[in-house]
Image: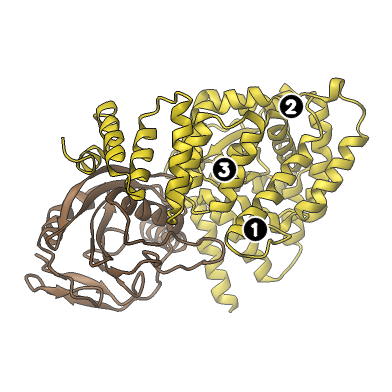
Amino acid sequence: MRIKTGMLAAAALAVATPGPALAGWKVMPAGQAAAVAKSGLKVTPQSAWNRASWRPSKKGESWTLDGMLLNELRFFAGIAPGESLVKERNKKDKPLPKFSAQMLAPDIVQYFEATQRIVLGTSLFEVDSVEPATLAGHQGVRFTYHYAVQGDELRRNGEARAAIIGGKLYLIDFSAPALHYYDANIAEVRAMMDGAKL
Amino acid sequence: MMRRARKAIAALAAASLVLGPMPVLAQDSGALAYQPQTSDERGLWLEMDEAERTLKTSRFVVRDPELNAYVRGVLCREVGEERCRGVRIYIVRTPGFNASMAPNGMMQVWTGLLLRMRNEAQLAAVLGHEFGHFEHRHSLQNFRSIRGKTDAMAWLSFLGTVGLVAQVGLLGSIFSFNRDMEREADVVSIGYMRGGGYSPGAAAAVWRQVIREGEATAIARKQKPRRHGRGFLDSHPAPEDRMTYLANLARDVPDVGGGGFLGAGEYRGAMAKWWAPLIDDQIKLNDFGGTEWLLEEMALGEGWTPELLYARGELYRARGKPEDFAAAAGFYREALAKGYALPELRRGLGLALLRTGATGEGRALLKEYVTMQPDAADRPMIAMLAGGE
């Protein structure tokens, strides 16, 4: 009976969760610098992460430790003016905001927030802090946020680091359920953000 | 195909059952009003009661007791206290224009709908329409017609929508009532409005607004306006047709004293606390044309208030075309000139000015913002943009 409930819950979760049904994975070994998002941006994980073959956009890449629903680390590199952060899946009815090289730090946060609200279809998305930071030695922004998605209800926390380098946007974003996973992973993620090189 | 369909049915049917971890609470589904009569109907109510338990605990339900009492009060005024008791209204935080009604009396009203109503009578039109589905038991008719079919896909589409009840956001499509049902609900809603003393013409105005906003969205996106609208409107009569027949119906009903109650001021008062977060949800949808139209429409009623001007500044600044920053700065300045004390107004104007190259003035305004809002989430960043502390 217990097993059956678990299966049903898994089935329900599969129905409720958007995203790829099938993905190929590649282990990103601990302690080895890895070039991400087909760019010159390099990070060094402390533990072994799994890189999904499925990508959020041509200029993005997703990693996870325990599955995307439990911890998702995304890298975006070289987003050019006029481009959306992630792939536009419904250009006609839900066009995504576009990047501009003149954006100030708060504009980048706003661009990220609007993109997430539209893609996730949620109004419960709040930015909790925005402060100056560097990414790969360039002036940028660090921000934290939390959100929930309809039909899931779990509170998720997130933190991102971004900078405009040579007129293009570089952004690393981590999100995970506030329950256990965010706190369990955030120190390692911050170290990766701090150590990112271009 | 069939096996896969059956599997999917099992999964979807389960979705609404397993996602609700709360213990069963005593339901007051229409305790004093209508009770389900047949086994079909009892089964349907049971499903909906399960879905309602999930909804009850959702973070997306707006629990503000004043707003809830106001919305409920409008429904009760038009259908009467007795019949009103069979309905539980849930205000759901989601920016689309939608409301829905389940057969057990669970009504959902989206905040995007509340943002768009211009007066109490318009809200009464929508609530009355949804109540019409409930009172005429349209869901049951649908359920029976589907049960009569052997086609597994018909089951799938029905159970699919029930399963999705667990996903609050998709509830707009719980039951695709057919067009005759929609029309019937429209017709009875005019009667309810009259009963509550509301101006029946407000029902047609709702649809006029839906059409115009859709057009404005499409034009700004360089698309052709669509006749049917999107989402839940697809199963409904075209907004143009509704606007016309509702206007005709409103003309034909016996006179409501003095043309009926509109309640624009009452509505604005009830929504005052919620307007800012709801327009913020709307601005973040990246729908410049539709949002600009909404703001202009609101300004027709109440003039360009500081709140509307601030929202317009935010909208232009969010779009961020090169010419938008000067326009945004203009709107912010107007709001400032009207004495608007909101700290975020300084933030918006300051950021817009930095983008237009008016760095000195922009920084000074950002400094004002961080002084006024020392605990702001973005204080460290804005303080840096203001030139350091």
The reply, left or right, for residue B211 in relation to residue B218 is: right
Q: Are marks 3 and 1 in contact (CB under 8 Å)?
A: no
Residue displayed at 59% across by 54% down: B162
The reply, left or right, for residue B151 in relation to residue B389 is: right
Q: Which residue is mark 1?
A: B230
Q: Which mark is residue B112?
A: 3
Q: Secondary structure at mark 1?
A: loop
Q: Earlier in the sequence, mark 3 or mark 1?
A: 3
Image coordinates of residue B309 in percent, x first then y, are 51, 35
Callout 3: 10 Å neighbours few (<14), some, many (20+)?
Answer: many
- Kind of residue at disc 3: Gly
- Kind of residue at disc 1: Arg
Chain drawn in brown? A
Query: Does residue A5 lie above or below B327 as drawn?
Result: below
- Kind of residue at disc 2: Leu
Q: Chain of mark 3?
A: B
Residue at the extreme left: A31
Q: Which residue is mark 2?
A: B262
Q: Are marks 3 and 2 in contact (CB under 8 Å)?
A: no
Q: Chain of mark 1?
A: B
Can you tell which quarter of the image residue B110 is in? top right
Q: Secondary structure at mark 3?
A: helix
Chain B: what color?
yellow
Can you tell which quarter of the image residue A100 is in? bottom left
Residue displayed at 77% across by 59% down: B145
